[in-house]
Structure formats: C-alpha cells, structure tokens
Amino acid sequence: MPTITRRPLRAGLTVAAATGLALLGTATSALACHSDDTRANPVGANVTTCAGAHLPGTLVTQEDAASVFTFTGGTTKDKYLNITKVADGVTVEAVVVKGGDGYNVYEPGKRELATTPPWEKLRSPLNGGGQQATISHWFACIGKTAQPTETTQPTKPSETPTTQPTETSSVPTTSQAAPTEAPTSTSAVVAAPAGNETGGTGGQLANTGFDNAWLIYIAAALLVVGGGLLALLKFRRRGAN
C-alpha cells in the first residue's frame, strides 16, 4: 500500500478548506441581498444592461430616460425613483434600480406592480446593515409598438346639373342643350395599414433569483473531507509511535 506523505496531504487539505470557505462566503453574500419592496425582485450583483440582467427589450440608460419617461428622483442623491408617464407607443419590459449590494428588477404587471404608470418609490435593495441604499444608477428595457396608419377615405363623385330646355316665341320648337359628360368618379388609393413592429427580442424570462445554493453543499463537503483526512493522519501518527 503506498504511503501518503504528510506535506502534500497537508497542502491538499489547506487548499480544500480555503476553497470551501470561499464558496461558502460567496453563497452567503448572495443570499444576503433582499428588499423591503414586494413589487421588486432583488439580485445580489451589479448590472448595467438588459442582457446582463437576462431581460428582454432595448436598453434605455438613465441619461436617455427623459426621451421615454416622465419621472422624478433616481439620482445618486435619491433613494427613490418615481415614473409618472411613458411615451406613446412604448412598452416597458422592466425597470432596474441599482444601489448598495445589488439591484431590484421591476416588471410591469408582475409582483403587484401596475401594468401602466404611475410607478412610485422604485428603489434599490437594502444594504448590508438593513438600511435603504441610495440609488447608484438605473435603466429600463423597452419594446416599441408602431401605431397603425390611417386609411384614406374614397372621395364621392361630383354631380353635374343638366340644362333645362328653353322655349322661343317665334317658332314653337324646343331646343335642348347637349347633355354633359357623364360624371366621373375618382377614388383615392387606400393605403394598406402598416404592420405592427414589435420592439425587444422576446427572449427567455429573466432568471433573476439566486441559483447558487449548490456552492454551500460543495463547501460543506470539502470541509468534511478535509476534517476526515486530518483525523486519519493523526491516527496514523499515533500508530507509528
């Protein structure tokens, strides 16, 4: 039976223990992100784009938000964002508010958030001390819906009055004016309504919850294995003595 040297064994145990503690710390930090707003889905990470947050739609940054939204707050000095109006023809897929240890995802029509504005007191998650964090930045993911074009109504044909026959006093003959040309009807070409243009990519639903619980199990397993190997080494040392 091959003999296990002490030095490589100790090095392996040290690496296993350190890895387990690191994974456990990462998992604990992610689980710590939470919000006091039931309308939001808190995520313990930093994000700046719709793709990074696994959300559909076109990115509207905080700097360009005034062209789409009517809002107040949302600056680095504020804790809340209030959106009172959205531009016509715009569909909002999500609003992301970042601050503290993570970001909150607000999706209209989900988790008690109204489908249409006003959306008041949108906020970032609570910080590590359980206090409301100020907003570091926010953005939105939108999809545009084109309005149908108006159809042109056809024009009615014009009516031309006919000339009544005239009578002369000398000869009892009746002259009748030549009939006018038949009325022409003109109709404008009806423009076909343009098809709807849909904005956004319609990707998969956002996977914004925490799904790294397996890290905790791996960390626990490494700690158990490391403890067992240390006990085995100590037992062998006593047997040798």
Image (cartoon, rainbow, N blue to C red):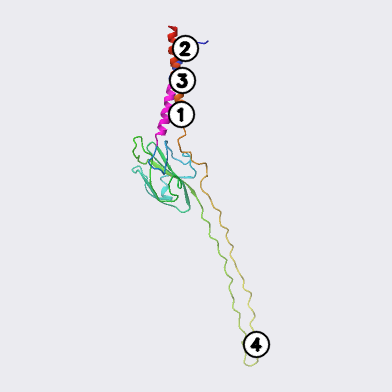
Tell me the CA gap for discs 3 and 2: 17 Å
Residue 60 visible in image: no
Tell me the CA gap for discs 1 and 3: 15 Å
Tell me the CA gap for discs 3 and 4: 125 Å
- Dot 3, how many residues are within 10 Å of its Cα: few (below 14), some (14-19), or many (20+)? some
The mark closer to the camera, 4 or 1, is 1
- Dot 4, how many residues are within 10 Å of its Cα: few (below 14), some (14-19), or many (20+)? few
Residue that badge 2 annotates: 5
**N-terminal-most mark, 4 or 1:** 4
Q: Which image quarter is the C terminus in?
A: top left
Q: Would residue 4 be counted in the magenta stretch?
A: no
Label 4 residue SS: strand
Q: Are marks 2 and 1 in contact (CB under 8 Å)?
A: no
Amino acid type, residue under disc 4 in the picture: Thr
Q: Residue 174's mark?
A: 4
Q: Residue 215's mark?
A: 1
**N-terminal-most mark, 4 or 2:** 2
The mark closer to the camera, 3 or 4, is 3
Label 1 residue SS: helix
- Dot 2, how many residues are within 10 Å of its Cα: few (below 14), some (14-19), or many (20+)? few
